Amino acid sequence: MPARPQRRRTISRLTIGAAVLAAAATVTATALPAGAETGHGARAGRTVDVQLLSFNDFHGNLEPPQGSSGTVEELQPDGSKKSVAAGGVEYLAQSLRTARKGHPYSVTAAAGDLVGASPLLSGLFHDEPTIEAMNKLGLDVTSVGNHEFDEGRAELTRLQKGGCHPKDGCYVKGRKFRGADFPYLTANVTDEKSGKPLLKPYTVWKHKGVKIGFIGLTLEGTPDVVSANGVKGLKFHDEVETINKYAKVLDRQGVKAIVALIHEGGLPASTSYNYNCDSPGPGDGISGPITDIAKHVTPKVDALVTGHTHQAYACTIPDPSGQPRTVTSAASYGKLYTDTTLTYDRRTQDIVRTRVKAPDAVNHVVNRTQPKAADMTSLIARWNKLAAPVANRPVGHISADIAGRGAEAPESPLGDVISDAQLEATKAADKGGAQLALMNPGGIRSDLAFKASGSEGDGVVTYGEAFTVQPFTNMMNVVDLTGAQLLTALQQQVSGPNAASPKILQVSKGLTYTLDMKKSGADRVVKDSVKLNGTALDPAKTYRVALNEFLAGGGDGFPVLKDAKNKYVGPSDLDAFTAYLTAHSSASDPLTPPKADRITVVK
């Protein structure tokens, strides 16, 4: 691991190797220049500025994400917006290392979903490559996110503590996976039987007398967005109560400076990463779950690093005492990092928050015009060599980009392709007899890009690219649902837990309806507009519906789907997707992007 200039970290959970590095860094640290430890306008030596670098929702994107998934929107001085290519661990590592220069007090933290829903380069190896990369780039601490539970508690524990995969073994002969050098924090995740946190609830970063406590947790609703097997035997607790509980614990230990790393987020009024979300204009600011959480978290906590919504913001939200407090998120996929200045008072051992303002927390683009971090280039090449026989196999051809993750409308062209693929894989009488298919939008993790990602040629879709779109390998289920239950499912897209942030299901060809967003809640679905192959939905009739096992379990806020009957288990969603691409495209007749006109949206 390359040494970080004038930087030493001490996290309470250190492997022997990390401890040796920390000791080495201490020995080689040079004297600070006069005034280097002086905070803003304070008496020399009384305060010190601590640099907090943070990011979230990396999702194993070691290579730069393709298509719109690999860009950020930048607001220009004239009010226009510019798309900037960003992301990739070679550039993220370089950005963080550059940012640390000149900052003798620097700590790097993350807010969950470092892994899970990862591209093939990481996902094929159960995300060991991403943990290795995080070790190398100097991550000090992270909270868990919901995707850390995709493969269950045992796998999360393995990522923390190391050891070879129980089924797939070790990927490199003679080399045992060492696990994360940084602690994963699970403050609000406890074992149902013992009541104890799954992993550590908090940790304390120390450097030259400065102490900062980190409390890490995921959203309480994690069981609603993860398969049941992934969270079996675990209980997820209220975010505010958990943070406040451990803030008291840290305070009693004499740790007054506290940062919460929470995998829950908000929705800023603008999608531009450099939008000023403290702007007082009508409709400005930030909404979503994190706003209410931030307003109720104890003033003992000095900053909140957040995630989950994949949005970019650097806001101030008043704490319960009325003091401003930073709340930040760095979008996703390593496209941004946040640089926050925490002014630490040596006498009180706390963060000075009376002067918090927007410039104290700034999001920066991880641009691809900077040099690549050589050790990350080497890491990618090494794992790519192992993945190549699987990843580079062509599975289809497309005539242009097919937008999925980056689509702006509720219905995406790639959503149509995936739902059609799922219907085709299950419509035969001996394959489940499906009449329609439903696909959750969160399960579509990327676009399909026309431009070649490697040497395969433009328009060629490789297995690795298809895996990036559908990385969960969920098994397809075909179930009985009545017309009334189907209508309820469509209404649950825009009501209940999905009212504030609708989750619009992608639908197969033949299912059409109107979504009136001028109305509220379940009324947004125009009942008499729902038709299958031109015939109105019959509430009393039974329909055979294909959907992945996550949705079939009621995931993403669709509890009615758990009431389905007569389940048939088909192929995986990935196999259905690749088979469809192969069957419906060729070099001479590539697949064209669908019109995405099955759902009529009234705004």
Image (cartoon, helix red, strand yellow):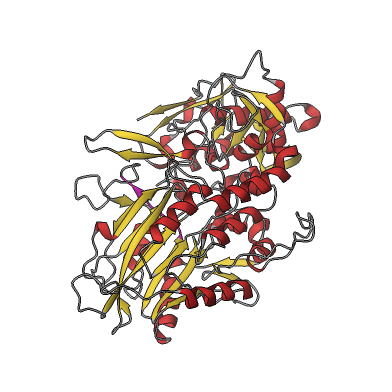
The x, y position of residue 420, in whole percent, is 63, 27
Check the image and report above or below for 110 versus 538.
Answer: below
The x, y position of residue 232, in whole percent, is 66, 62
| The C terminus - image quarter | top left
Q: How many numbered markers are drawn?
A: 0
Q: Residue furthest top?
A: 588
Q: Quadrant of residue 362?
A: bottom left
Check the image and report above or below for 41 versus 267.
Answer: below
263, 503: nearer the viewer: 263
Residue 266 belongs to the span the image colors magenta? yes
- Can residue 124 be seen? yes
* Residue range highlighted in magenta: 263-269
Check the image and report above or below for 444 versus 332.
Answer: above
The x, y position of residue 553, in whole percent, is 64, 49
The x, y position of residue 505, in whole percent, is 53, 36
Q: Quadrant of residue 18?
A: bottom right
- Can residue 201 be seen? no
Q: Residue furthest right?
A: 430
Left or right? Give the position of 560 relative to 87. Answer: right
Left or right? Give the position of 34 relative to 538. Answer: left
Residue 525 belongs to the span the image colors magenta? no
Query: Residue, x 40% and y 78% (percent of image)?
Result: 211
Query: Residue, x 76% and y 55% (percent of image)?
Result: 172
47, 496: nearer the viewer: 47
| The N terminus - image quarter | bottom right
